[in-house]
Amino acid sequence: MRLTLVQNNPGSDLAANMSVLRELVLRAADQRPDLIGLPEYYAFMGDRSQDHQAAGERFDELNGWMSGLARETGIAIHAGSLAERRDGKTYNTTVVHASDGSELARYSKIHLVDIDLPDGSGVRESAIIARGTTPVVYQVAGWTVGCSICYDMRFPELYRKLRDMGAELLMVPSAFMRETGRMHWDPILRTRAIETGCYLGAPGQVHEAAGGQIKLYGNSLICDPWGQVTARASDIECIVTADLDRAYMEDIRMHLPVHRHHVL
């Protein structure tokens, strides 16, 4: 299986964001992958809660646009996430589009970022986003893929559940903060791959908002079940590609069968 990740830098100009994103996805399609992965909030990154809630009103429009792009390229797209308004709430939602544009899967972020930072500021994702409740896997190119979003990566029990559901590739679309990213991004993602015996793809945003309120890390990566990073972006808009080898994964799982040794 070939996986290509898109790393983009969306701001508050939705039309400009989508124009750049289209070009990046078409570049990704030139790699002829089986799956293209996009970052969390791939279409829009506002600085205010009301911006995200307003973006959620355009979910159907943006989701339809991405479905059309999957159909145009003939490649499945794991479409990072969008703000989705439903039942009077806003969710952070991934939709996966098959190569014919049909919907393969939909997942809403389960773990929300509610933290206090050393400078006295804080992040309260739960103030604008409702929590999802259901782990999700889907099939593409004969592989089972597990869904997660950004902050989910800090909770290994979700990934154990995805592995129990048959996951072979874990997708972690992200908009990861720059300061924490420097210390936590690689160790956490590599650990999730090692402890599950799965490949892992983490497409991230690289972003700095006007005024500097939001600074995002980039460094989109693909790593194998041994924890080796096989493809990595830096801090620019770009694509990265790696080939996934099932025989290699199965060999690691056979010689290090961690999944069979859980007792709690």
Image (spheres, rainbow, N blue to C red):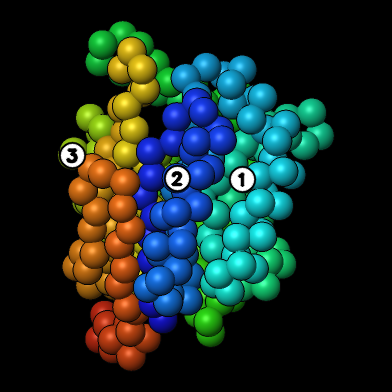
Q: Residues within 10 Å of mark 2 (few under 14, many from 20)?
A: some
The residue closer to the viewer here, 228 or 66, is 66
State which quarter of the image contains the C terminus.
bottom left
- Residue found at the very far right of the displayed protein: 87
Q: Nearer the viewer, mark 2 or mark 3?
A: 2
Determine which quarter of the picture holds residue 190. bottom left
Q: CA distance from mark 2 to mark 3?
A: 29 Å
In this figure, which residue is indicated by the disc labeled 1?
A: 93
Residue 212 at least partly seen: yes
| Residue type beneath disc 2 | Val
Where 130 falls versus 71 (above or below)? above
Precedes in sequence: disc 2 or disc 3: 2
Q: Which mark is residue 20?
A: 2
Where 209 falls versus 258 (above or below)? above
Determine which quarter of the picture holds residue 99. bottom right
| Residue type beneath disc 3 | Met
The image position of residue 141, as x and y in percent, is 53, 82
The residue closer to the viewer here, 58 or 189, is 58
The residue closer to the viewer here, 31 or 166, is 31
In the shown orientation, is residue 233 left or right of residue 113?
A: left
Precedes in sequence: disc 2 or disc 1: 2
The image position of residue 85, as x and y in percent, is 73, 34
The image position of residue 50, as x and y in percent, is 61, 17
| Residue type beneath disc 1 | Thr
Mark 2 and mark 1 residues within 8 Å of each other at the beta carbon: no
State which quarter of the image contains the N terminus.
bottom left
In the shown orientation, is residue 85 left or right of residue 120?
A: right
Disc 3 element: helix
Q: Residue at x 40, y 64 (%)?
A: 28
Q: Which mark is residue 183?
A: 3
Q: CA distance from mark 3 to mark 1?
A: 26 Å
Q: Residue at x 23, y 58 (%)?
A: 232
